[in-house]
Image (cartoon, rainbow, N blue to C red):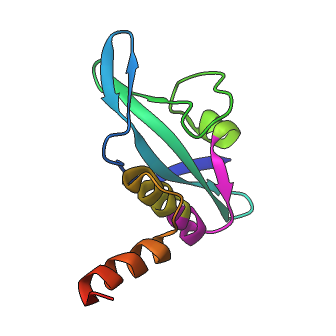
Amino acid sequence: MMRFKELGVCKPKGLSSVKEGTKSDISLRIVGLFDTITMIWTYHVVSTGTWGANRVELTPDLHDRVYSGEYTLNNVKSHGRKFDTQQEAESFVNEFKIKWETASNNTLQEVRDEKLKELTNE
């Protein structure tokens, strides 16, 4: 049997979507799927929006195809980006957030290096 547990949520600034006339901020969610038979975790990252009365649905921001917008275990497993470790999933989310918010293709380390240069006036 598979169980799922939300392990983290990130809301990149300015990332939103409109559905049925309602605007929603997009969240990146790290979801752990636990196979209770084999006792092995897998980790998935999905993008979601919240519409209506707290109706959370998948959005196509990280998924090339979304068959159903519902935020369910099956859709996370089918449409989420899969990672072997939670740390890999967290790194992906952080990289996505940095690139979106800085509007550049620089990595987190490159952004840090640039800020350090600015602070030290090099």
- Residue 21 or residue 56, whichever sits in front: 21
Above or below, 57 relative to 85: above
Q: Is residue 43 magenta?
A: no
Residue 55 in view here: no
Residue drawn where x is 72% and y is 58% of the image: 37
Above or below, 22 relative to 38: above
Above or below, 49 relative to 52: below
Q: Is residue 84 magenta?
A: yes
Q: Residue furthest right?
A: 38
20 vs 95, left or right, is: left
Residue drawn where x is 33% and y is 77% of the image: 115
> Residue 122 at x, y = what percent?
33, 89
Chain part drawn in magenta: 80-91
Residue drawn where x is 33% and y is 84% of the image: 116
Question: Residue 18's quadrant in the figure?
Answer: top left
Above or below, 37 relative to 28: below
Q: Residue furthest top?
A: 20
For the image, the number of numbered tags is 0
Residue drawn where x is 63% and y is 43% of the image: 80
> Residue 36 at x, y = what percent?
66, 57
> Residue 63 at x, y = what percent?
63, 36
Residue 99 in view here: yes
110 vs 22, left or right, is: right
